[in-house]
């Protein structure tokens, strides 16, 4: 089995990546509804977004116009309602976003195990640069270096993780990230790791993710 | 690892109950008058599962169905923190999403096993989403639906089938 890595090296809009993701999900769901001899490869999109605040599924329709206006900060950022789990977060330049689109059933894992697997892949990725990660009851923080939120439809995953490499952390200071009061956000850069780019972290994460799924072979497609 | 272990535990519980379910009706048929075993088999046929672990149980007149997620699915999700319920009068086709169940950091769509019109969502879950973990196939039901075509139930799976699939799925 191959893992396809769709790598978007440029800074792109959230909506652009959403479309690619929706398309992959639709293909996998169509395959599940009418299986053919060759299932679509498990795929992982990595990207770096233009500034965007996204809220989670339980906040859809509950973020007031005034709050949205504040988040948009005079057009410097977008605001999008996402159907993933988790609460409000920020994505932007300097942050590595990874969205795996896989059928959990094919890999024999439950939703809970999948969240756990993503957390572990984040921790292993951070460890490559000497950053020690832990998970807490609300996964992913003490100082939060990564955010996690997953959507599942018929066990097909979308959304995933975001790791701050050299994100401008000001964007997080304006919000209560993931509904966690008093938690600070950090990045590779803030932790003293400066010689690393978003692309390096993406490659490392994809490798760790593949390994934890038991897939050794990765095929990289660059979408410029 | 802990997650893996707890899944294994869940599967064990399900398989041991499966044994009970498989044997009881046989004994009932043998020991009891025909009319009783007949009513049992109607009841047993009326509850069906999708391969993604939603269940639907038809009312005795076959016109309305109650939809929920299976015990296995509730265990596999972990603690439910939020449930997005369908609104009344929503017309759905089999396979449409009618809401979502959110556990820690993941939101899973709930798929309607049949076509029809939503009568109500289980408002208890708005205040107490954890009811899904406590009693997923009872008071943790998600929605009631006016069933358009009870023939669609034929394409769904019986409890025994879903449990044998489970054994193949879990590692």
Image (cartoon, coloured by chain):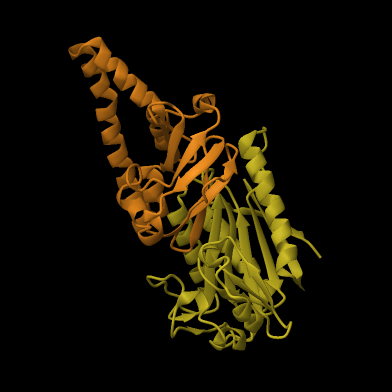
Chain colours: A yellow, B orange
Q: Position of residue A92 (x, y in %)?
A: 67, 77
Q: Eyeballing the image, is A128 above or below A34?
A: below
| Residue at 56% in and 35% down | B115
Front residue of B144 and A181: B144
Front residue of A208 and B112: B112
Q: Dividing the picture into quarters, in which one does residue A64 lie? A: bottom right
Tell me, yes or no, if residue B5 can be seen here.
Answer: no
Q: Eyeballing the image, is B137 above or below B126?
A: above
Q: Eyeballing the image, is A176 above or below A115?
A: below
How many numbered marks are there? 0
Front residue of B47 and A66: A66
| Residue at 31% in and 38% down | B14
Tell me, yes or no, if residue A69 can be seen here.
Answer: yes
Q: Work out which quarter of the rendered image holds the N terminus of chain A and state it.
A: top right
Q: Position of residue A44 (x, y in %)?
A: 64, 58
Q: Position of residue B6 (x, y in %)?
A: 32, 52
| Residue at 61% in and 68% down | A204
| Residue at 42% in and 28% down | B161
User: Is residue A46 rendered to the left or right of residue B57?
Assistant: right
Q: Dividing the picture into quarters, in which one does residue B38 lie? A: top left
Q: Work out which quarter of the rendered image holds the C terminus of chain A and state it.
A: bottom right
Q: Position of residue B98 (x, y in %)?
A: 54, 47
Q: Dividing the picture into quarters, in which one does residue A66 lie? A: bottom right
User: Is residue A22 rendered to the left or right of residue B15?
Assistant: right
């Amino acid at each position: 089995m191959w893992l396809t890595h769709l790598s978007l090296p440029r800074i792109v809009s959230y909506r652009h990546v959403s479309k690619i993701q929706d398309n992959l999900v639709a293909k996998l769901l169509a395959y599940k509804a009418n299986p053919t001899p060759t299932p679509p490869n498990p795929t992982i999109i990595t990207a770096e977004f233009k500034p965007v605040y996204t809220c989670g599924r339980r906040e859809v329709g509950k973020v007031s116009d005034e709050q949205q206006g504040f988040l948009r900060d005079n057009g410097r950022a977008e605001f999008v309602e996402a159907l993933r789990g988790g609460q409000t977060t920020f994505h932007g330049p300097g942050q590595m976003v990874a969205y795996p689109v896989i059928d959990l059933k094919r890999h024999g894992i439950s939703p809970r195990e999948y969240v756990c697997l993503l957390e572990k892949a984040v921790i292993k990725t951070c460890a490559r640069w000497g950053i020690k990660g832990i998970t807490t009851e609300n996964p992913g923080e003490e100082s939060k270096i990564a955010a996690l939120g997953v959507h599942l439809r018929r066990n097909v995953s979308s959304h995933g993780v975001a790791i701050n490499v050299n994100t401008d952390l000001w964007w997080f200071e304006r919000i209560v990230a993931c509904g966690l009061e008093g938690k600070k956000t950090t990045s590779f850069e803030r932790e003293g790791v400066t010689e690393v780019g978003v692309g390096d972290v993406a490659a490392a994460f994809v490798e760790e993710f593949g390994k934890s799924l038991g897939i050794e072979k990765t095929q990289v497609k660059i979408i410029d | 690892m802990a997650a893996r272990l707890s899944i294994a535990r869940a599967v064990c519980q399900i398989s041991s109950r499966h044994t009970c379910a498989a044997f009881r009706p046989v004994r009932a048929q043998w020991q009891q008058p025909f009319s009783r075993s007949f009513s049992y088999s109607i009841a047993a046929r009326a509850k069906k599962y999708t391969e993604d672990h939603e269940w639907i149980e038809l009312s005795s007149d076959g016109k309305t169905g109650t939809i929920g997620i299976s015990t296995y699915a509730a265990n596999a999700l972990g603690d439910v923190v939020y449930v997005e319920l369908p609104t009344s009068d929503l017309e759905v086709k089999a396979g449409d999403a009618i809401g979502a169940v959110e556990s820690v950091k993941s939101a899973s769509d709930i798929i309607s096993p049949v076509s029809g019109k939503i009568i109500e969502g289980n408002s208890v879950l708005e205040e107490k989403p954890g009811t899904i973990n406590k009693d997923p196939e009872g008071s943790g039901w998600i929605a009631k639906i006016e069933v358009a075509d009870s023939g669609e139930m034929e394409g769904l799976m019986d409890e025994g089938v879903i449990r044998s699939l489970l054994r193949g799925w879990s590692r």
